[in-house]
Image (spheres, helix red, strand yellow):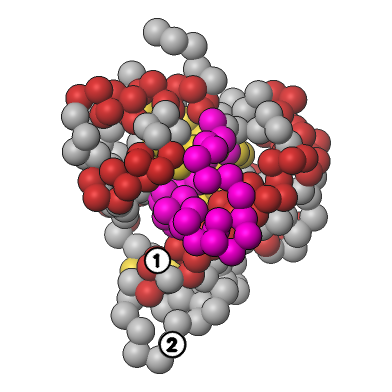
Amino acid sequence: MSIDVHQHLWTDSFVAALRARTAPPRLDGWTLLLDGEPPYEVDPADHGHRDTTGLDLALVSMSSPLGVEFLPPEEAWPLIDAYHEGALALGRPFGVWAATCHSEPDPERLAKDLDRGAVGLQIPATAVPDDRLLDVLTERDLPLFVHPGPAAVPPPPGAPSWWPALVPYVQQMHASWHHFHAVVRPRHPRLRVCFALLAGLAPLHSERLIARGGTGRGLVDPGFYVETSSYGPRAIDAIVRELGIDVVVNGSDAPYATAPDPGLGAAALHAIRSTNPRRLLSLPTP
């Protein structure tokens, strides 16, 4: 079984909900308007038919950089419900990361959404995770997926279009990795977490962490996974050297990128694309 844990696909119901808004996040036709980012021309083909050849499971999630999860509840829930409605109807090979509102957390509503068939919960890296939401996941033995959130600070004048993806997104993942290790893990020892884009390469800073008074060098948390989207063999190899192969899982960030070839041989490829994501998702061994 080949698994991709990180894709995005906007269904008709979600697109209609974004177009119905009069303030960011909103779609004006196919122009995406967000706070903190320049207007983005969405390619409709990116959210139409998706080629999933070779994949047994492709997990889609709501795009956290939109900022939907931080809207007031009366604005957030119509968008989240529209996302769930469309994504859960996609059928195989698609699976769904649930989304939830962080301005007013509702663990009972999350539990109902998970019980509808979502594989776990995605949250923005900029969210302070609510313990009640994490308890819902632990009770169901379901994982958490941490994804970059909104680029809250506008880029400096003259910054190129890639600025949000390379600066605030990476910084957010870096901060989230350390926050989960230092603060969240002691309170939720059984929670499995997957960090997008190799956690912003935060694991590679362990030497600096030790030099500044941190601990944990050489200790790998088997419940904290990292996915590979937007990185290639050099970064993946460095992460494997630091964390080992068992916590690295395949992610593409489709339609914005394609899944990388780790370049580490057939056994590593099988671990990253099949064995490890199955363990993350607690799927039975075939």
Q: Which residue is mark 2?
A: 156
Three-letter code for the amino acid on which mark 1 is drawn? Ala
Q: State if disc 1 and disc 2 touch (CB < 8 Å).
A: no
Q: Residues within 10 Å of mark 1 (few under 14, many from 20)?
A: some
Q: Secondary structure at mark 1?
A: helix
Give percent across and percent down for residue 45: 28, 51
Q: Quadrant of the C terminus?
A: top left
Mark 2 surroundings within 10 Å by alpha-carbon count, few (fewer than 14), some (14 through 19), many (20 or more): few
Q: Residue at x 31, y 80 (%)?
A: 160
Give the left or right position of residue 63, taking residue 143 as reference: left
For residue 178: magenta?
Answer: no
- Where does residue 275 sit, x and y in percent of width and height? 39, 21
- Pick out the residue farthest to the top: 286
Indicate the quadrant where residue 263 lies: top left
Residue sitting at 54 percent across and 31 percent down? 222
In the image, residue 151 above or below residue 44: below
For the residues labelled 2 and 1, the Cα–Cα distance comes to 14 Å
Q: Residue at x 67, y 61 (%)?
A: 70
Instruction: Quadrant for the N terminus, please.
Output: top left
For residue 165, the mark is 1
User: Where in the figure is residue 4, as x and y percent of width and height?
Assistant: 37, 34
Which one is nearer the viewer's eye here, 254 or 178?
A: 178
Residue 242 location (% of width, % of height): 40, 43
Q: Is residue 84 above or below residue 72?
A: above
Visible residue check, residue 94: no
Q: Is residue 109 left or right of residue 155?
A: right
Mark 2 vs mark 1: which is more N-terminal?
Answer: 2
Q: Start and end of the magenta stretch?
A: 193-222
